[in-house]
Image (cartoon, rainbow, N blue to C red):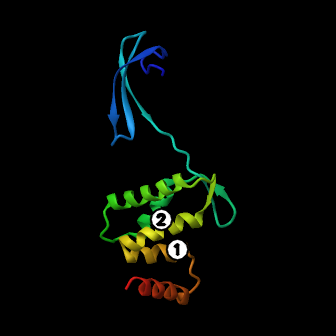
Amino acid sequence: MKCPHCGHTDNRVVNSRPSNNNNAIRRRRECNNCGKRFTTYETIVEILPRIKKKDGRREEFDRSKLERGIKKAMEKRPISSDKIEELIDQVERKLYKVEETEVSSKLIGELVMERLKEIDPVAYVRFASVYREFKDVTEFFSELKHFIENNK
């Protein structure tokens, strides 16, 4: 670890403790060259599978892109930001468990819709209408009818 004050790489750990809901370790370090202290955080780096899009393109998983889509579906709905973060965290956890190096965007959409059904039916229908690319009102109505029948 390089000292941010002098750039020297020889330092020692003075204090270590869990941080950020036990998802990281906070370490207080002291530079053996200049004597100044600094803090570092150690976290696990988990690699998510790449996403295969409908058109065949492949891209890295982008949490912010998923968040934008979900927030758009939940616009003007009585749903807290914490609930949205929880939903995205759940989708990410399921993706970490997939033992493939690549997953289809369809899987992600299905995971989101599965949770949205439970959280907010209106947000579910909004998300489904964009995700499933309904071509006309009949397809939209068919999805809505199916949703109502399965949630009586």
Q: Is residue 19 above or below residue 141?
A: above
Residue 86 falls in which quadrant of the image?
bottom left
As rendered, which of 86 and 73 lies closer to the eye?
86
Residue type of the residue flagged with mark 2? Gly
Q: Position of residue 75 (x, y in %)?
A: 38, 69
Asked which secondary structure carries label 2, the reply is helix
Residue furthest out toward the top: 33
Check disc 1: other Cα within 10 Å, few if <14, some if 14-19, many if 20+.
few
Residue 95 x/y as whole percent: 53, 56
List x then y, in percent, for residue 20: 34, 40
**Residue 54 falls in which quadrant of the image?**
bottom right
**Of residues 70 and 89, the one drawn nearer to the viewer in this rendering:** 89
Q: Is residue 128 left or right of residue 14?
A: right
Do the numbered discs 1 and 2 sit on residues whose CB atoms are within 8 Å?
yes
Count the marks: 2
Tell me which label, 1 or 2, sits earlier in the chain: 2
Which quarter of the image is occupied by the C terminus? bottom left
Residue drawn at point x = 35 percent, y = 40 percent: 22
Residue type at mark 1 is Val
Q: Is residue 125 left or right of residue 77?
A: right
Percent x, y for residue 124?
43, 74
Tell me if residue 107 comes above or below residue 151 in the rendering.
Answer: above
Name the residue at 37% across, 26% down.
Answer: 27
Which residue is pictured at 38% across the width and 72% down the height?
118
The residue shown at (41%, 70%) is 116
With respect to residue 72, does 5 lie above or below? above
The residue tagged 1 is 130
| Dot label at residue 69 | 2
